[in-house]
């Protein structure tokens, strides 16, 4: 059965840590696809970044 996991963080290191933790906790998963995206926007003059990853796996 195909499954989906979405990760989204404001810092790229947090995304990297979360992915590494997920892979460590689920060593037998079969990765089908991994989609990475970055975006940014401003709120009240503050620059906000979004680093996200969509993981498709079995």
Image (cartoon, rainbow, N blue to C red):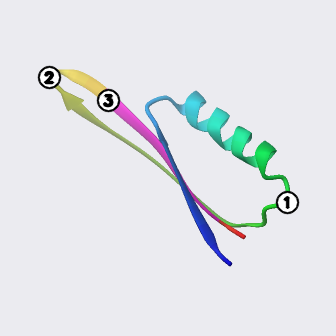
Above-or-below relation of 45 to 10? above
- The reply, left or right, for residue 52 in relation to residue 30 is left
Question: Given contact means CB atoms under 8 Å apart, are the residues at marks 3 and 1 in contact?
Answer: no
Residue 46 is situated, as x and y percent measured from the top left of the image, at: 24, 21
Q: Inspect the magenta stretch and tell me whether residue 50 lies in it.
A: yes
| Residue 29 picture quarter | bottom right
Residue tagged by mark 3?
Answer: 48
Q: Inspect the magenta stretch and tell me whether residue 20 lies in it.
A: no
Residue tagged by mark 2?
Answer: 44
Cα gap from disc 3 to disc 2, whole angstroms: 10 Å
Q: Residues within 10 Å of mark 2 (few under 14, many from 20)?
A: few
- What's the magenta bit mostly, secondary-structure-wise? strand
Comes first in the chain, label 3 or label 1: 1
Cα gap from disc 2 to disc 1, whole angstroms: 44 Å
Residue at position x 72%, y 40% in the image: 20
Please give the range of residues in magenta: 48-56
Residue 34 is situated, as x and y percent measured from the top left of the image, at: 62, 60
Residue tagged by mark 1?
Answer: 28
Residue at position x 66%, y 33% in the image: 17
Residue 35 is situated, as x and y percent measured from the top left of the image, at: 55, 59
Residue at position x 78%, y 45% in the image: 25
Above-or-below relation of 53 to 43? below
Give the numbered dot on residue 37: none
Residue at position x 57%, y 37% in the image: 15
- Which quarter of the image is occupied by the C terminus? bottom right
**Element assignment for label 1:** loop
- The reply, left or right, for residue 52 in relation to residue 21 is left
Cα gap from disc 3 to disc 1, whole angstroms: 35 Å
């Amino acid at each position: 059965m195909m499954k989906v996991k979405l990760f989204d963080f404001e810092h790229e290191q947090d995304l990297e840590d979360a992915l590494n933790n997920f892979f460590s906790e689920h060593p037998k998963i079969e990765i089908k696809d991994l989609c990475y995206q970055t975006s940014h926007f401003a709120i009240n003059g503050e620059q906000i970044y979004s680093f996200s990853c969509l993981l498709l796996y079995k």
